[in-house]
Image (cartoon, helix red, strand yellow):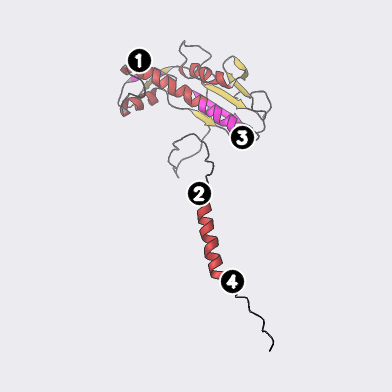
Amino acid sequence: MGKGKRKVPGLNQSSIADISFILLIFFLVTTSMDTDTGLPRRLPEWDPNAVEEEIMIRERNIMIVNVNKFNEIYVKHGAFNGRVAIHELKDIAKEFIANPHDNINLPAKEEYVIPDFKTVVTTIKHVISLQTDRSTSYETYFQVQNELTRAYNELRDEWCRQTFGKGWVDASEDEQTFAKGMYPSKISEAEPRQYGTTVVAPQ
């Protein structure tokens, strides 16, 4: 009597699916992923009734920071128009924002009432216009934003020390709000465009 062929038991497809799912979950849980680096920004609330309008800015009140496709940084404000290194940007921005020596080529100072505090004299109408090329690297963009943010932070810290006798870290929440009123962040970002190495002056 001949031996019959042994049947190979079929694979349980549902078990394979379960195992695959478990392996996928294990991979997602155990694999480390790079996290994006960014700068914290508080965006204004959207106003559906807001009307977009063109605002005219005096030339002395604006500083243009242009990052071209070669990741070179060019700055224009007042009589200055040229290329700068990243480590120079913070101090250039601080001088522009504060205008400590009342330079006629830097932002005009005027009286401004800080809500719930007092009247101060500051460059309340200054604007830093950050312009980038579509090919600008994110790393360079981040470095530029970081240096501009450091400029504001250092000015606020210095003002807290002069006004309240303590630095920004030790200042109360209200005192920090007053410092932001003295030196409000005025960074305007234009849509990335195709720029050369020449900084475009405001019209």
Kindly give the residue lying farthest to the bottom in the view shown.
1
Q: Which mark is residue 30?
A: 2
Give residue 114's position: percent from left, percent from top. Answer: 35, 24
**Residue 11 part of the magenta-drawn span:** no
What is the three-letter code of the residue carrying label 2? Thr
**Amino acid type of the residue tagged 1 in the rendering:** Gln
Q: Amino acid at mark 3?
A: Pro
The quarter of the image holding the C terminus is top right
Q: Residue at x 69, y 27 (%)?
A: 196
Residue topped by disc 1: 162
Q: Amino acid at mark 4?
A: Leu
Q: Which residues are magenta?
A: 119-146
Can residue 125 be seen in this snapshot?
no
In this rendered view, identify the residue nearer to me: 176 or 59: 176
Residue located at (62% from left, 22% from top): 74
Q: CA distance from mark 2 to mark 3?
A: 38 Å
Give the camera-side residue of 70 and 3.
3
Q: Nearer the viewer's eye, disc 1 or disc 4?
A: 4
- The residues bearing labels 4 and 3 have C-alpha atoms spaced at a distance of 57 Å
Residue that mark 3 sits on = 192
For mark 4, give the secondary structure.
loop
